[in-house]
Amino acid sequence: MLGMKARVGLVLAALGLLATADGAGAPFGPGVVVAPSDITLSVHPTIVSSNDRMTIRGSVSNGRPDQKVTVQFKACGAHPLIYRDALETTTEAGGDYSFGQQGPFHLGVSGVYRAVSGDSVSAEVPVYQRVSVVLRAAGRGRYRAYVTAVLPFWRRHVLLQSSRGGGWKTLRRLLLVEQLGGSSGPAPPFQSIVRISVRTAPFRPGVRQGTRIRAVFPVKLAQPCYLGGVSDERRA
């Protein structure tokens, strides 16, 4: 508990994520705050996958204990695109606060964090979410590629790539033609993030046995709310 009085206040029901296919609009809204502030915020890591955990910490310059600190998050694709309270705690002696190894609080999409204490607002910290990409055997030498995220990517494509000791070579594009039911993932406190999986039709890699293959979801198709993703390698 790090000697703190901490409680998590993650707001999901009011988020209103837009499941737009074209991803139009700026992902985080206008302007990142860079002016000096009486409160600081750091988030690590700032590039995350769906199961990563983050450390969120900072300090208030006056060094007083028991000051309320609220960490807020502005999620890409949310409507309206505003900050919402995500975490709340109080400072320790010296003015420090921390939410060590919590998360994921990014609600499954890229976005921006900031911390607020009284009239003080920290600089903004962008956090970027990677799309989850999985390559699975589908029987009889065939495979399927899956892309999973909070926002759906139906009718977009993944790249099938191969390598035999050198660099990766793109063999062809594979269309994501089937959208599966959403699956729930953990999001404190006692709520869930619904992630949507889309997959390709079964395919044969068309490469020599033993060749390494992988599926890649390009960043240009994942934007603006995600970074691209790469599956684990498999042997054909």
Image (cartoon, rainbow, N blue to C red):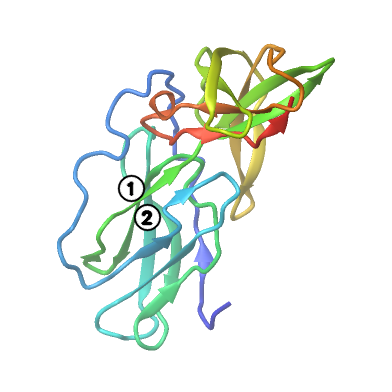
Query: In the rendered image, which residue does mark 2 sit on?
Result: 72
Where is residue 171 drawn, in percent x and y? 56, 16
Marks 1/2: CA–CA distance:
6 Å
Where is residue 208 drawn, in percent x and y? 72, 19
- Report which quarter residue 111 is drawn in: top left
Q: Compare residues 132 and 230 and report the one nearer the observer.
A: 230
Residue 111 relative to residue 175: left or right = left
Residue 168 relative to residue 207: left or right = left
User: Measuring 63% from the left and 29% from the top, which residue is drawn there?
Assistant: 164
Q: Is residue 144 above or below residue 7?
A: above
User: Measuring 44% from the left and 49% from the top, which residue is drawn there?
Assistant: 47
Q: Is residue 145 above or below residue 28?
A: above
Q: How many marks?
A: 2
- Report which quarter residue 206 is drawn in: top right
Q: Secondary structure at mark 2?
A: strand
Q: Given the current orientation, which residue lies at the most extreme front position?
A: 165
Q: Compare residues 148 and 200 and report the one nearer the observer.
A: 200
Q: Secondary structure at mark 1?
A: loop
Query: In the rendered image, which residue does mark 1 sit on?
Result: 83
Where is residue 64 drawn, in percent x and y? 32, 86
Whichever of callouts 1 and 2 sits on the residue coming sooner in the sequence is 2
User: Measuring 50% from the left and 44% from the top, which residue is drawn there?
Assistant: 107
- Report which quarter residue 178 is drawn in: top right
Query: Label 1 sits on what residue type?
Result: Tyr
Verify CB contact (< 8 Å) between mark 1 and mark 2: yes
